Structure formats: structure tokens, C-alpha cells
Image (cartoon, rainbow, N blue to C red):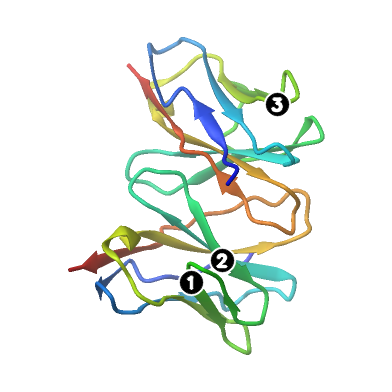
Amino acid sequence: EPEVTQTPSHQVTQMGQEVILRCVPISNHLYFYWYRQILGQKVEFLVSFYNNEISEKSEIFDDQFSVERPDGSNFTLKIRSTKLEDSAMYFCATLESQLHEQFFGPGTRLTVL
Amino acid sequence: DAKTTQPTSMDCAEGRAANLPCNHSTISGNEYVYWYRQIHSQGPQYIIHGLKNNETNEMASLIITEDRKSSTLILPHATLRDTAVYYCIVRVAGNNNNDMRFGAGTRLTVKP
């Protein structure tokens, strides 16, 4: 069964550093999402991406965040200058069409020191 | 999007059916009911979804009331590996901007 993959599984970084989280979507999927989950809290929507542009973003997704699909396959989330409160699990999800279900990746655990 | 209400936690004996309720009294006519679960800190896993008819797949059954204001997810023979947080989400399908909005969910504990 096809699956969404994410790298790295765990990223440790210093506050103020830039990080890039990567996602490889399922091959025929057209819609891409990033979510985050702070330890012990609920899964929160960050951003959705379709047709090479952001479709929707939450209030969490401020100017420190950006997304892109640089090579037509990988879908990346960049945090320009990490803060302690960015420590969380980050999940990528992809969707074939809006009539289907979202498939989630295993997540990247980001630890900001 | 309509909001959902779920019990915070539930227990179920191994081998028995687990019935997880969800209230969505303000659901709109074009909103689907989706169920996901999250085992420990893994990525959410899709279980099932439906609009107004009852649905069944290899994982579970979804029973939606006739007025669509509530639904029940049924795991027919719960195993220890079904211990997870279960999320009921209502969402419009066919809208390009729709994401999944997760609540707190129900923490199901399957006990031996």
C-alpha cells in the first residue's frame, strides 16, 4: 500500500536556526498539508498546498514558515528561525482528491533547544 | 465547519465491540463525517467516512443517525492494538481548501 514518508524522523536544532522538514507524498496525490502536534496537545492544521500554491493557512503559519514543492515530488516545510515553542511533531498529509481521505506520514519530531 | 463532541475517554474489553459516539448537531448537509485514530505519537490513521448512509470497511462500521446529528464508530472485535485516540471530524468534501480540524478525540483503552 502506498504511503507518505517524512524525513528526518527526529530533528534537533538550536533556537534561531533554520530547519527544513521533508515529505514525499503518495505519487498521484494533488493536495498537500502540514500539521503539527505539540506534546500532549491536539493535532493542529498549519497549511494546505495545491497547484503549487498555498490554499489555506492557519494563524500559526506566520512569516517564519514557508512551504514549497521544489522538484515536483518532495513537499517541504521550512521554519526560518526556530523558537522553543516550535518543538512538536510535524505531520505531512496528502490527498488524491477532495472526495477522498487524507493520508498522514509518520511525522518528524522537532526539538528546539 | 461543524464542531464535534466526543467523550474524553472510554474503556473496552478485548474481543468486545467498541462503540465510540460523536455528536455533531450543527452538521451541514454537505459535510461528511470522518473518523481517524492516532496510536501513541504516530501519524493519524484514516478509519472510515460517510455522508448519511451507514458504512463498513475492514476496520470498522460507521452508523450515522437519520438526522445526521450524531454518529457511532464501531470496532467489532477490539484488540489491544486498537488502543488509541479516536477523532471524529466533520468536513465538506469537494472544497479545495478543506483540511482536517482535529479536536481532543476519545482516548480508547482496550483492556485484556
Q: In the displayed image of the protein, which residue is found farthest to the bottom? A: B66
Q: Is disc 2 placed on a helix, strand or loop?
A: strand
Say which amino acid is labelled 2. Answer: Ile
Q: Is residue B7 left or right of residue A94?
A: left
Q: Is residue A46 above or below residue B15?
A: above
Whether residue B15 is visible here, answered yes or no, is yes
Picture disc at residue B48? 2
- The residue depicted at 52 percent of the width and 39 percent of the height is A105
Splitting the image into 4 quarters, where does residue A29 fall?
Answer: top right
Q: In the displayed image of the protein, which residue is found farthest to the right? A: A51
Say which amino acid is labelled 1. Answer: Ala
Picture disc at residue B60? 1
- The residue depicted at 41 percent of the width and 58 percent of the height is B104
- The residue depicted at 51 percent of the width and 44 percent of the height is A44
At label 3, counting other C-alpha atoms closer than 10 Å, the crowd grade (few under 14, some 14-19, many 20 or more) is few
Identify the subunit bearing mark 1.
Answer: B
Q: Position of residue A72 (x, y in %)?
A: 75, 24
Q: Position of residue B44 (x, y in %)?
A: 47, 50
Between B74 and B28, the one lying in front of the other is B74
At label 1, counting other C-alpha atoms closer than 10 Å, the crowd grade (few under 14, some 14-19, many 20 or more) is some
Whether residue B34 is visible here, answered yes or no, is no
